[in-house]
Image: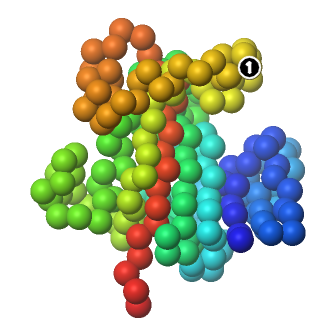
Amino acid sequence: MKKLNLGCGNDYKKSTNNVKWTNLDFNKEVKADIYHDLNKKLPFKDNEFDYILADNVIEHVSNLFVLIDELWRISKPNAIIEIFAPHFSGIYAFKHPAHRQYFGIGSFDTYKPISGLDKGFQGERYGKARFKILQQKLLYFHHNAAEIPLLSKLPINFLFNFSRTYQLILEKFFPLKFDEIYFRLKVIKQKE
């Protein structure tokens, strides 16, 4: 199984007998297998990876649509992409000067492989990528809180993720803010 740790930072993942990790980052001050600017075409073949982890990285790119198409291109059919990103309401969204994107429930609806009749999809398309959204979850505390690690371990996120409608109501009316949002996507490709 081939896995990509996109924007690995200090989270360098080691390969095992069953899993071959490729760690990619632009910052040459961290350990990575490949150093690359995510604003450029990714240096991988089509259909190369079974799994991609993007942990707080996609919010830094200047053209998200190009990166999403690239992630789709390098993923095998039915590959899984897991994304952690700043929620638009949280302190991490605007705190970092390099953040260019912020996310919420429905941010990947334009990539659903369906007609315009599906709830949450309004017919927009911004590239070739198509995904089945397996999960989108509001995270009250950052999943890997470096400053206060105890907060990441508090089991409270289930309170905010009963249904999509409930999540949307919380985003609109909840007086407290969410640090992050988590997406689990399945890559959809037509047989060629």
Label 1 environment density (alpha carbons within 10 Å; few <14, some 14–19, many ≥20): few
Q: Quadrant of the C terminus?
A: bottom left
The residue carrying mark 1 is 149
Q: Residue furthest top?
A: 175
Task: Report the coloring of the rendering.
Answer: rainbow
Snapshot quadrant of residue 147: top right
The residue positioned 63% from the left and 71% from the top of the image is: 49
Q: Is residue 134 left or right of residue 139?
A: left
For label 1, the SS is: helix
Q: Is residue 19 left or right of residue 122?
A: right
- Numbered label tally: 1
**Residue at (72% x, 16% y) in the render:** 150
Q: Is residue 49 visible?
A: yes
Examine the rendering and report whether any part of residue 64 can be seen.
no
At which x and y percent is residue 26? 72, 52
> Left or right: 120 with respect to 2?
left
Q: Residue at x 68, y 22 (%)?
A: 153
Residue 176: image location, x then y, percent: 42, 11
Q: Quadrant of the N terminus?
A: bottom right
Apparent side of residue 81 relative to residue 118 in the rendered image (left or right): right
> Could you say where residue 20 lies in the image, as x and y percent from the top left?
79, 68
In this view, which residue lies farthest toward the left? Answer: 117
- The vertical placement of 108 against 101, above or below, is below
47 relative to 29, above or below: below
* Residue type pointed to by label 1: Pro
**Furthest residue in direction bottom, as rendered:** 192
Q: Residue at x 39, y 53 (%)?
A: 133
Image location of residue 22, percent across then percent down: 76, 63
For this rendering, which residue is in front, 77 or 102? 77
